[in-house]
Amino acid sequence: MIPAQRRELLLRELRGTGVLSVKELCDILGVSHMTVRRDIMTLEEEGRVRSVPGGVELASQVRSEPSYLDKSRVHLDEKRAMAQAAAALVGDGQTVYLDAGTTLGHLVPSLWGVTGLTVITNDLTTAAALSDHPDLSLYFVGGQIDRENRSAVGDIAADTVSEFNIDVAFVSTSSWDIGRGSTTPSRAKVAVKRAAMAAASASVLVAGADKYGAFGTFKVAALESFSSVITDDRLADSSARAIRELGVGLEVVTPQGGSGEGAGPGSDGVVRLQPTV
């Protein structure tokens, strides 16, 4: 079989089972471990599959998101590590946008040591947590309230965000991959995220590796549109390499007590900013 035929067979087998190990694919396709890995990497770059430990699964469509409360209970160590990496990009006197989400909510404690900061957010929980900051200009983005995710969404929120000159926008996502970029099942969220990116000198996607390889109905932006991406060390080596080959800065963090694999922690290409004058 030529590579294209082999990859179609791989996809057909996955449609029947949902997930297969690399060893199983070697037996089914009659090829080497290295060949299977190359096929997986190619299909992953196309957004059709995603790597899992020891194997591969079909890319899945995200049709709805868990509630804010449900999201706040999972992957806490990874979220804290990603938030710490994001906080390292924030300097005195900057204007930053914090998108809605539980990962970026973990950024809040790190902002207490930053002076002269201006924060714009559409996240109700983040806004409440920062409201007592002694040296902070805080703007909450109005608009339609998404009760399940405790955030403001829609065109009114987007119009407000577009009024600012932002140094760095930290953007969250429920799904992302190299083929489709950052996506969401909620159309109302798209305009706000795009407005923040358009108003910012740099945009940083902060997204857990568990969300990689999934996709939503609505596209927010291609990965190349972001200055950098911060994720955790569950991201497959092949995916990390492919993202860096796009020219996107990638920081892969290891949670405290965890052990990184392959890509490891680091700040490969992540942009450090100076405040807007």
Image: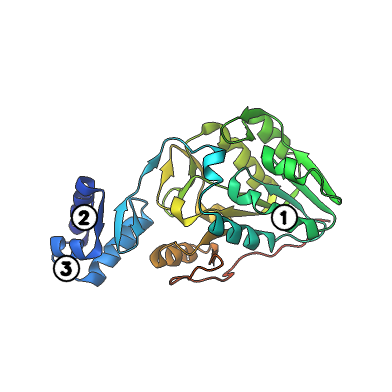
Residue 271 at least partly seen: yes
SS state under label 3: loop
Residue count near mark 2 (Cα–Cα under 10 Å), binned few <14, some 14–19, many ≥20: many
Q: State the separation of the CA atoms marked 3 and 1.
A: 51 Å
Residue toward you, 251 or 225: 251
Total marks in image: 3
Upstream in the sequence, badge 3 or badge 1? 3
Q: Nearer the viewer, mark 3 or mark 1?
A: 1
Q: Which residue is mark 1?
A: 109
Q: Which residue is mark 3?
A: 31
Amino acid type, label 2? Leu
Q: State the separation of the CA atoms marked 2 and 1.
A: 46 Å
User: Could you tell me which residue is drawn at 44 percent across and 62 percent down?
Assistant: 234
The answer to which image quadrant residue 50 occupies is bottom left
For the N terminus, the quadrant is bottom left
> In the drawing, does residue 245 fall left or right of residue 91?
left
User: Could you tell me which residue is drawn at 80 percent across and 49 percent down?
Assistant: 118
In the rendered view, tell whether residue 139 sits above or below residue 167.
Answer: above
